[in-house]
């Protein structure tokens, strides 16, 4: 079983067309692929889909699913942002809920660039990473309690630029307490946490989200996981899936969640392909 439900196309901030992505997925032996274009955010967010591009995105995916029937199953999903429009299962087969922006009255993107991240940390939080983490994980908690959300996207995105602990200690008890608190809400609401290799593709990280301590916590508290590459370029469609499988096994997971025609089902890790 090989699946990736976190992918982006030219309709938002991805590089490739739906068809290019689908052909790549077939080529790499995927059983299914899901598209999760960025749902409409606010008027100035160039990464999210306008009403018009969302319409075309949906039509293009329906068309591809018909055209490639029997070769691959294509799922229509969306990545909804904590501060953007909310979606439902009448229009989409699954929904990823993600936090990319933090703030209160004003919002700023924490993952656009390291310079922007450092600026937000400095200007809004006086370089107090824990204060920033508190606000970030509060937003994750809110998303994790939304009924429509199936998958929590990159749960510790705040650590995107923290390779080698540059901004904070991954094991800081206060940091972990905020993160665990958000994870608890996700688990209580039956959400799936994704192992996401997107930051590896972009050269910021050497390991997938979530950090190993969080992954262990999810496992020990009977949380569910899936695996994705948050793909913005088809060359990375299955990037480091083997690393995800190894890590998941290492911390003790026996299963991963996969979307099928009847909804999400647990599949033994041994049956998952990288
Ligand atoms: Zn995202
Ligand atoms: Zn994404």
Image (cartoon, rainbow, N blue to C red):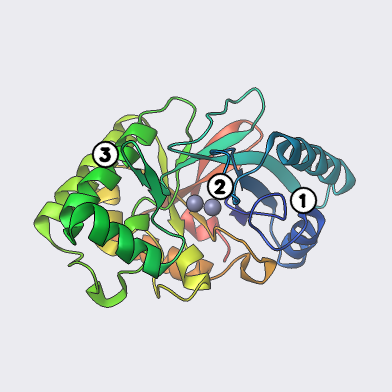
Could you give the CA–CA distance between mark 3 and mark 2, rounded to whole angstroms? 22 Å
Front-most of 173 and 4? 173
Q: Are marks 3 and 1 in contact (CB under 8 Å)?
A: no
Quarter of the rendering containing residue 182 = top left
Work out which quarter of the rendered image holds the C terminus and state it: bottom right
Check disc 3 and report the residue beneath it: 138
Q: Nearer the viewer, mark 2 or mark 1?
A: 2
Q: Which mark is residue 6?
A: none
Could you give the CA–CA distance between mark 2 and mark 1, rounded to whole angstroms? 32 Å
Mark 1 is surrounded, within 10 Å at the Cα level, by few (under 14), some (14 to 19) or many (20 or more) other residues, namely many
Q: Reading the chain from its start, which is encountered first: label 2 or label 1?
A: 2
Mark 2 is surrounded, within 10 Å at the Cα level, by few (under 14), some (14 to 19) or many (20 or more) other residues, namely few
Residue 184 location (% of width, % of height): 25, 38
Residue shown at 79% from the left, 61% from the top: 20
Quarter of the rendering containing residue 77 = top right
Residue 251 location (% of width, % of height): 30, 61
Quarter of the rendering containing residue 25 = bottom right
Q: Reading the chain from its start, which is encountered first: label 3 or label 1?
A: 1
Query: Would residue 249 be seen by someone viewing this image from the given angle?
Result: no
Left or right of residue 16: residue 13: left
Check disc 1 and report the residue beneath it: 72
Work out which quarter of the rendered image holds the N terminus and state it: bottom right
Image height of 163 relative to 179, above or below: below
Q: Which mark is residue 45?
A: 2
């Amino acid at each position: 079983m090989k699946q990736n439900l976190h992918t982006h196309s030219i309709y938002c901030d991805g590089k490739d067309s739906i068809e290019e992505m689908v052909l790549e997925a077939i080529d790499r032996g995927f059983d299914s692929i899901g598209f999760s274009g960025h749902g409409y955010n606010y008027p100035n967010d160039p990464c999210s889909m306008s009403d018009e591009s969302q319409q075309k995105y949906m039509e293009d995916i329906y068309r591809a699913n018909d055209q490639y029937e029997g070769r691959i199953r294509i799922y229509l999903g969306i990545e909804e942002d904590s501060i953007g429009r909310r979606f439902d299962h009448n229009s989409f087969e699954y929904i990823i809920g993600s936090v990319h922006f933090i703030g209160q009255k004003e919002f700023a993107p924490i993952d656009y660039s390291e310079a922007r991240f450092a600026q937000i940390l400095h200007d809004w939080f006086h370089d107090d990473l824990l204060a920033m983490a508190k606000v970030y994980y509060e937003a994750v908690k809110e998303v994790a309690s939304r009924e429509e959300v199936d998958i929590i996207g990159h749960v510790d995105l705040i650590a995107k630029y923290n390779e080698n602990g540059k901004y904070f200690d991954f094991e800081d008890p206060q940091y972990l307490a905020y993160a665990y608190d958000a994870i608890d809400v996700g688990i209580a609401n039956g959400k799936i946490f994704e192992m996401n290799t997107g930051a590896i593709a972009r050269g910021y990280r050497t390991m997938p989200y979530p950090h190993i301590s969080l992954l262990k916590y999810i496992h020990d508290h009977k949380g569910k996981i899936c695996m994705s590459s948050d793909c913005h370029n088809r060359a990375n469609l299955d990037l480091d899936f083997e690393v995800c499988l190894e890590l998941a096994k290492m911390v003790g997971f026996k299963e991963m969640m996969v979307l099928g025609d009847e909804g999400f089902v647990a599949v033994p890790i041994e049956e998952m392909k990288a």
